[in-house]
Amino acid sequence: MWRIGLIILFLGAAGMSEAQSLAELKWKKRLVIGSVENPLFLAQLRKEISKNQIEVRERKLFFLIHSDQEWSIYGSKNAPSEAVLAEVRKRLGDADLALIGLDGGTKERFRKEDFSLQVVFELIDRMPMRREELRRESEEGRIRN
């Protein structure tokens, strides 16, 4: 089933095609990984990501969502390695989606019915590393002004 198709929604600098494991994205990207066989959900997710591009980039989010549809990749030409797909399967367990932090730890697992980017943004914004990012940005803003 995992080989049937893969949709990767990518916004940011590091491409999954360059990574041979999720660990290579550690400290570079926060990941939303998932396996969702629902075209309506995927269309809505794409729309939500597009509408919130600034917030997605600010939070260093990368999306790796598996589907039984065709696969297309944004920001890359190659599919993730089998090793990456195996890691995604293991991380998900019986959840539909999961949030992986900059430190590589699984922060939250979701059913697709309970998932929204706003929930992900709120979770990330409560994380210590994100709060530190915001504090630094705030200090840099005061220095410039």
Image: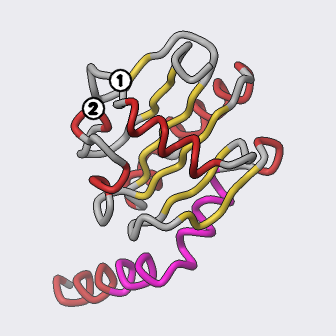
Observer-nearest residue: 118 or 70?
70
Name the residue that disc number 2 marks: 17
Helix, strand or loop at label 2? It is: helix
60 to 9, vertically: above or below: below
Give the quarter of the figure containing the N terminus: top right
Which quadrant of the view contains residue 33?
top right
| Image location of residue 139, percent across then percent down | 28, 89
Dot 2 surroundings within 10 Å: few (below 14), some, or many (20 or more)? some
Name the residue that disc number 1 marks: 79
Q: Amino acid at mark 2?
A: Ser
How far is the residue under mark 2 from the one under mark 1? 6 Å
Q: Residue furthest right?
A: 113
| Relative to 21, 30 lies left or right | right
Q: Residue furthest left?
A: 144
Q: Amino acid at mark 1?
A: Ala
**What's the mark number on residue 125?**
none
Colour basis: secondary structure
97 inside magenta stretch: no
| Image location of residue 28, percent across then percent down | 29, 59
Which quadrant of the view contains residue 25?
bottom left
Q: Residue at x 63, y 48 (%)?
A: 92
Report the label total.
Answer: 2
127 to 85, vertically: above or below: below
User: CB under 8 Å between callouts 2 and 1?
Assistant: yes
Q: Residue at x 64, y 34 (%)?
A: 35
Q: Residue at x 56, y 23 (%)?
A: 2
Helix, strand or loop at label 1? It is: loop
Task: Give the overall secondary structure of the magenta segment.
Answer: helix
Q: Residue furthest top?
A: 70
Dot 1 surroundings within 10 Å: few (below 14), some, or many (20 or more)? some
Q: Which residues are magenta?
A: 117-135
